[in-house]
Image: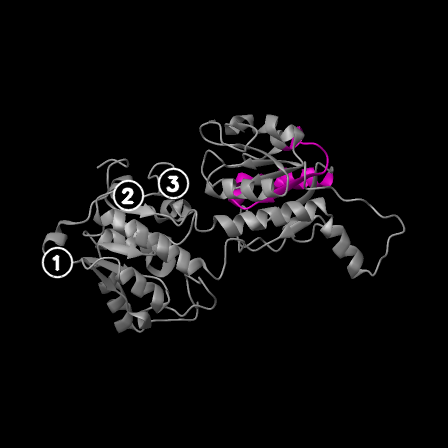
Amino acid sequence: MTHDSLPHAPASLADGPLKVAIAVPLETEHVEAIRAIDPRVTVLYEPDLLPPERFPADHSGDPDFARTPAAEARYWELVNSADVLYGFPNESPAGFARVVAENPRLRWVHAMAAGAGGAVKASGVSRDELERVAVTTSAGVHALPLAEFAVMGILNGLKRTAELAADQRTKRWPELRVPTRLASGSHVVIAGLGEIGLETARLARALGMRVSGTKRHAEPIPGIEEVATADRLPELVRTADAVVNTLPGTPFTERLIGREVFAAMRPGTILVNVGRGTVVDEAALLEALEDGTIGYACLDVFAVEPLPADSPLWHHPRVFVSPHTSALSSAENRLIAERFAGNLRRFLDGEQLPHRVDPVHFY
């Protein structure tokens, strides 16, 4: 089976129901919605085996949670009897690797993350096994909260909120009032015009911003002034007021936004990163901050996470640090469960599953 071929429901459907195991914390109402999709589906859900959520969409659950040896055995018995998994076991690459090795009937795993390719790669599961077990992501579910965060970052830079906050902390009322920049008419370049990038573009255009961006295949997109491939990013950023990265972390995107791209920018450019931290060369970013090329950086992701305590980004006066939380929203579990339910219908009907992790490039 090639990556482009259809994932198939196992032959056991002819003899019995499709078994779907809930491997991560999920509210009962969402489990029941999945259970109601089709009478051919049996949902395996034992909440006592799952760590309690500390907040909405806490897919890993309470880190202090521990199963008894009997409960641990039961958990693995449950996930190893499933045809389909909702979530990686224990929400970890190691859990995914173990279930693929131990469960020969497994055909599909739906990941909670939009960028689950990194976890799949980290699991070490072979390409052949990834052809057998399709992995789909929750890409698109997080598009709106990420886009709102990106626009917040752009506005923070345009409206000088870092300087205003610093003045407030010191009770400084400057004699000279410094003007801010308008969003309307500003030029935003989005690296990665996928679902997150297009949602960011939609919100930016609502504020009157002009939008350009990059895509794997440079095809015209309504409302986007110019669409180019990533190798032309230095050209695009020459007239940018703000640059937003939404790209995933792959060997092809690693340090894509580096010295060459920063050198092409105008002084005072705003940088927002809601993609993956590895796309931005952080050493080059610090240089660009120091020489004024980057006037403000709003960063939700970093090359190493958690961000090391000795990173200069923590205390730079024109950097906003967010601990990889911009995608979170109180509606996330419902939206992911709805996405999974739609995919489950496609799976039962033998249709192609969207947002499948590529077993070669891991995105």
What element does badge 3 sit on?
loop
Residue tagged by mark 3? 362
Where in the figure is residue 254, as x and y percent of width and height? 50, 37
Where in the figure is residue 167, as x and y percent of width and height? 80, 56
Amino acid residing under circle 1: Gly
The verdict on residue 153 being magenta is no
What element does badge 1 sit on?
loop
What element does badge 2 sit on?
helix
Does any portion of residue 301 appear in the rendered image?
A: no
Going from the N terminus, do you reach mark 3 or mark 1 first? 1
Going from the N terminus, do you reach mark 2 or mark 1 first? 1
Residue tagged by mark 2? 130
229 left or right, relative to 41: right
- Judge by depth and name the residue closer to the eye, 315 or 174: 174
Q: CA distance from mark 3 to mark 1?
A: 33 Å
**What residue is at 65 percent from the left and 28 percent from the top?**
238
Amino acid residing under circle 2: Leu
Residue 108 image label: none
197 left or right, relative to 334: right
The verdict on residue 277 being magenta is yes
Q: Residues within 10 Å of mark 3 (few under 14, many from 20)?
A: some
Say which of marks 3 and 1 sits in front: 1
Q: Find out whether the residues at labels 3 and 2 contact each other: C-beta distance under 8 Å.
A: no
Residue tagged by mark 1? 16
**What residue is at 54 percent from the left and 53 percent from the top?**
326
Locate residue 17: give its quadrant.
Answer: bottom left
